[in-house]
Image (cartoon, rainbow, N blue to C red):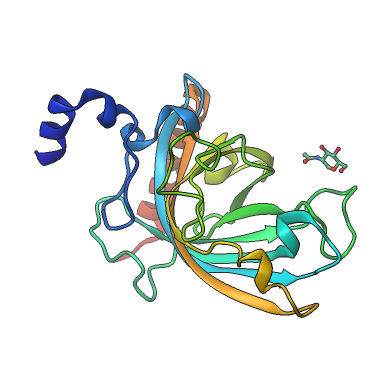
């Protein structure tokens, strides 16, 4: 109700509103600002809460990310559909994210490009994305994301995916309400090889097209039929 009121009184700021770190709640498609929204015809079909760590290594001789390299990212994903926070409850993990060296032409140790890969436990499907297509970092006047405290919010497109299953239908993934996890300050990279482990949380939102929605519906029916057949309780 309050947010509706704010929208009515300040249409402009409502349209471009991002969540502040203190605001909780599962985001919907309407919360994804235009800058990082997937193209027309894409529909949100799941939202997970992610909680994990980003590992940075100090390599003073390298320039990317001001000497700090994100050598790995890992987090558990928790379902949010029909649930209320807190989502990160032991035993409720439904997936995970980690960075995988999926590109066959980039198979050296510690490649500059790793692919954030989401794995879905129920059917083992997965999707991986390359560089974000759009982020909030370069946004004019943006203060709340991608700064020295919180990771950016961004839009990713699937680069590699499993050939079937729930996540094979994810064409785009939006990372929203990212908190913490930022790259350490450049001037703190003093010791070659030093590792810093930064915790982070975020929501990951999976989008698919009409064809994907139809496939998801069909797969759910098949799953439900199997459940009915084999679940004796
Ligand atoms: C894989 O790596 C090559 C060489 O760096 C690059 O040109 C290509 O775009 C990459 N493929 C994907 C899907 O990211």
Q: Quadrant of ligand 1?
A: top right
Q: Quadrant of the N terminus?
A: top left
Q: Horizontally, is 218 left or right of 109 in the view?
A: left
Q: Horizontally, is 93 left or right of 73 in the view?
A: left
Q: Residue at x 50, y 40 (%)?
A: 136
Q: Residue at x 31, y 36 (%)?
A: 17
Q: Nearer the viewer, residue 136 or 191?
A: 191
Can you give x and y, in whole percent of width and height, for residue 63 in the image? Answer: 80, 57
Can you give x and y, in whole percent of width and height, for residue 79 in the image? Answer: 37, 57
Can you give x and y, in whole percent of width and height, for residue 69 in the image? Answer: 72, 63
Q: Horizontally, is 56 left or right of 225 in the view?
A: right
Q: Residue at x 41, y 38 (%)?
A: 45
Q: Nearer the viewer, residue 233 or 84?
A: 84
Q: Horizontally, is 77 left or right of 100 in the view?
A: left
Can you give x and y, in whole percent of width and height, for residue 94 in the image? Answer: 45, 61
State which quadrant residue 15 falls in.
top left
Residue 112 to residue 191: above or below: above
State which quadrant residue 201 falls in.
bottom left
Number of marks in the rendered image: 0
Residue 215 to residue 176: above or below: above
- As drawn, which residue projects farthest toward the front? 187
Q: Residue at x 47, y 61 (%)?
A: 149
Q: Quadrant of the C terminus?
A: bottom left
């Amino acid at each position: 109700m309050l947010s509706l009121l704010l929208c009515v009184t300040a249409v402009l700021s409502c349209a471009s509103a991002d969540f502040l770190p203190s605001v909780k709640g599962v985001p919907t498609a309407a919360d994804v600002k235009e800058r990082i929204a997937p193209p027309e015809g894409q529909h949100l079909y799941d939202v997970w809460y992610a909680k994990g760590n980003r590992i940075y290594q100090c390599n003073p001789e390298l320039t990317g990310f001001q000497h700090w390299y994100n050598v790995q990212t890992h987090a558990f994903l928790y379902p949010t559909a029909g649930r209320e926070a807190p989502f990160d409850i032991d035993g409720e993990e439904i997936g995970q994210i980690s960075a995988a060296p999926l590109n066959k032409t980039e198979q050296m140790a510690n490649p500059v490009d790793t692919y954030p890969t989401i794995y879905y436990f129920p059917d083992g499907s997965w999707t991986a994305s390359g560089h974000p297509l759009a982020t909030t970092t370069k946004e004019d006047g943006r203060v709340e994301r991608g700064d020295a405290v919180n990771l950016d919010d961004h839009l990713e497109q699937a680069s590699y995916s499993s050939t079937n299953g729930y996540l094979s239908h994810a064409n785009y993934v939006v990372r929203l309400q990212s908190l913490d996890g930022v790259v350490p300050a450049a001037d703190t990279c003093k010791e070659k090889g030093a590792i810093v482990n930064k915790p982070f949380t975020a929501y990951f939102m999976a989008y698919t097209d009409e064809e994907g929605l139809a496939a998801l519906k069909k797969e759910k029916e098949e799953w439900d039929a199997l459940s009915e057949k084999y679940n004796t309780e």
